[in-house]
Each structure stands twice: as structure tokens, then as C-alpha cells.
Image: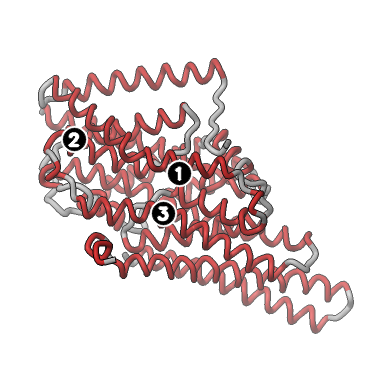
Amino acid sequence: MFLLAEVIDVGDLVNVVWTSLVAGIGVCLIYSLAIVGFARAIDMRREGNAIAAGAYFVLMFVAFVAVMAVVVYGVIVMTSK
Amino acid sequence: MDSDLILIIVVATALAFDFTNGFHDTANVVATSISTRAMAPRLAVGYAAVLNFFGAFLSLEVAATIANGIVEADLITPLIVFGGLIGAIAWNLITWYFGLPSSSSHALIGGVVGAAFVAVGPDAVIGDGLLGKVAIPAILAPTLAFAVAGLSILVVYRMVGRLHPGPVTRGFKVGQIISGGLLALAHGTNDAQKTMGVITLALIANGELGAGAEPPFWVIVSAATAIALGTYMGGWRIIKTMGSRIIKMDAAQGFAAQGSGAAVILAATHVGFPLSTTHTISGAVMGAGAAKRLSAVRWGVAGNIVIAWILTLPAAALIGGGTYGVTRIFGTGAAGPVVVSAILLAVIGWTFARRLRHGSPITAAEG
């Protein structure tokens, strides 16, 4: 571990690991929420439940916007280097 | 005059390498989108080419690492850079010919290190930089991508597993357009910079720039253009094998693999680790497959990737060092690079002609 710390910035390494995990899993999780909203909104509309369909549509919209925000944030982080 | 001619040859060789990098790595960016039919093939390749171009402008961290962190820039001459580039191109061609998956990044770094070692000796190589900025990230990248994609697809299946497949597939196909775009951007950000770094190294070696300088704007534009053109040309056979022969994936797996691969590459680029997009995406694709079912992954392919990954740095270093030795037979002028370039072009022409005659089973992903 001591040798590793001499040849590599362990802080950078840890940064890469946690950023990748959070970004990768986080984006998939949030996008899945958007899919859930989309699929359930279709189901609810088919069942004639307009209020629930609207709520799921809002979930889809918010999750989709959140994913796009993460993507934009990723690009901003790149341009700031 | 002679040194300017050498510099022109080095820049042209670097851009040729960049073109082949885009051509070879197009599969990494678009293969999953095409195989799940999220995008039409030509559209996917054009989309990736445009985003690769813009990605090259986003960050210069990796270029700085190549130019200053692997070899001692003040000991490097344009002939060393030339030797390194030929080592990288030759190794890429050899692995392509034999159907082995290879990392263009490691080939480039290996080639430059080998040529520098032969020309100057061990003092030219920054051992800590090589280990810390290349070797350790090389192990980390595919492992991390495998883990992130594996965990991501488990989360995805947990969330959408009970829903009707129709809207789920449609939704993830749209998601793949987004994640594929991010991946193309990340690829341009990471890979085009390697060429920028090498050209900058040559400019420093020729006295056009001071040590530690960043790539000039014309270098950024030309590298971005070369990788985008290479991407647009697309290595169709590799796209086919990468997209469907490691695993037969669904849209959710494609989304998870692309998103995870992009996350790892962007995170690494952010701190200046020049990692291999080929191995990162391969790791992510395998992770997305293995998390669903271990037997879904062709593990022979994984073995090939690891073997090629281990061989790339030393093999490219050997060729780079050998090329430098050959060019020095002709002195320190432009004669050596001219002769070596002519031989390389003849070999490339012969190889492509042979491939066209006999078919070209690029089996990068065939186990």
C-alpha cells in the first residue's frame, strides 16, 4: 500500500472509483425510474386512471430531466479541466 | 529543414494513428446501440463521429499526461516519437490481422516508451508515471467497468423486471441514444488527446514548444478531425463482433454497459488517467452480461482480451525500439522516417489487399 501510494495518487484513484460507481449506478437507477413512470403511465391510462397516469408521467419527466442534468454536469466537469 | 521534414512526417503519422484509433474503436461506441437496434448503423456511426469530434475539445488532461507524464519530454527527439508511433500502428495492425482485441492507448504509450528506452536509456522513462498513470489504471478500468455495469444492470432489472417488456425496451433504446452519445463524447475526450499529446511531444522535441506546454489549437482541431473521420468510416466487422458476440444483449444491458463505460472513462479522464476505452467498454459489456447470467458471457473472449492487454505494452515497446534503431541506421535526418514510412505503407497496402482477397474475419470478440 505504501509502494502504491508512492507511484499513484491514491486520492485520484479513489475519486475515479467512487465517481464511476455513483455516476454509473446512479444514472441507471434514475433512468429506470423514468422507464417505470413511462410504463406505468401507459398501464394507468389504459385502465382509465387519469390521476395515477398523470403522476407516473410526472415521475417519468422528473427522472428524465434528472438524467439529462447528470449528463450535462458530466460534460461541464470535463470542460472545467 | 531536415528536422522540419521529420516533424511533418511525425505529425502525419500521428494523425494516421488517430484515424485508425477512431476506425478501430468505433465498435466500442456504437456496437451495443446497433446490436439492440436502438439506432440504424449509419446513423449511429455518424452520431458517434460528430460527438467524438466535439469530445476532443473538452479536456486536455490526458494529452498532458502523454506529453509530460510517461517519458522525460526534454530527452525526447522527433525520431523517438516517430519510432513510438510506428510501434503503435504496427501493433494495432498485427492484432487486427490476427483478430486480437488491442488497446490503441497502450500501444501508443508502449511504442513511445520503447523508442525512448532504446534511444536514451532507462532515464528517459518515468517509471512511476508508467506504473501509476498507465499500468494500475489499466487493471482498474476493465475491473471497475465490469463491476459498475454489473451492479447497474442488477439495479435496472430490479426496477423494471415486472413491467411490460414493450415500453421498457422502447425506453431503454431511447436511453441508449443518450448513453451512446455520452460514450462517444467520452471516447473523443480520452482518445483524441493521446494523439494531441504525442504531437505536442514532437513539437516540444523539435523546439517549437517549451517543455510542459499544452497542445496548440491546430493540434486539437486536427486530432479531433482525424478521430471523427476514422469513427465515421467505422470498422463494421468489429462493430458486429463487439455488439453481439461477447454477449447477446438486450436494450437494458446495452444502456447499462454504455452508461457505465462512459462513467468510468469520464471519471478517469477527469483526473488524467489515459485508460483504454476498448478494455473499459469490453469490461462493461461483460459485466452487464455476467450479472444477468454468468454463462451469457463468452469467457474465451475475456481471456483473449487479457492476453492482448498484457502483450500490448511490451510488444509495442519492442517494435517502437526496433523502429528507432532502424531509423538511426540512416542517421538523424529525415531519410530514416521516409524509408520506414514507405515500408509501413507498403505493408499496410499488402495487408489490406490480402484481407480484401481472402475476407477479413476480424475476430476481436470471438472466443
| Mark nearer the viewer, 2 or 1 | 1
Q: Residue at x 41, y 50 (%)?
A: B188
Identify the element where label 2 is drawn: helix
Residue holding disc 1: B306
- Same chain under badges 1 and 3? The reply is yes
- Neighbour tally class for label 1: few under 14, some 14-19, many 20 plus, Cα within 10 Å: some
**Which part of the image, by quadrant, shows the N terminus of chain A?**
bottom left
Q: Is residue B20 above or below residue B325?
A: below
Dot 2 or dot 1, earlier in sequence:
2
Residue holding disc 3: B55
Number of labels in the image equals 3
Tell me the CA gap for discs 3 and 2.
Answer: 28 Å
- Neighbour tally class for label 2: few under 14, some 14-19, many 20 plus, Cα within 10 Å: many
Q: Position of residue A71 (x, y in %)?
A: 50, 66
Q: Are marks 1 and 3 in contact (CB under 8 Å)?
A: no
A41 or B216, nearer to the observer: A41
Q: Is residue B151 left or right of residue B307?
A: right
Q: Position of residue B336 (x, y in %)?
A: 18, 22
Tell me the CA gap for discs 1 and 3.
Answer: 28 Å
What is the three-letter code of the residue carrying label 2? Answer: Ile
Q: Residue at x 62, y 53 (%)?
A: B289
What is the three-letter code of the residue carrying label 1? Answer: Val
Residue holding disc 2: B80
What sort of colour scheme is used for the picture? secondary structure
Identify the element where label 3 is drawn: helix
B237 or A57, nearer to the observer: B237
Q: Residue at x 47, y 34 (%)?
A: B100
Q: Position of residue B44 (x, y in %)?
A: 58, 46
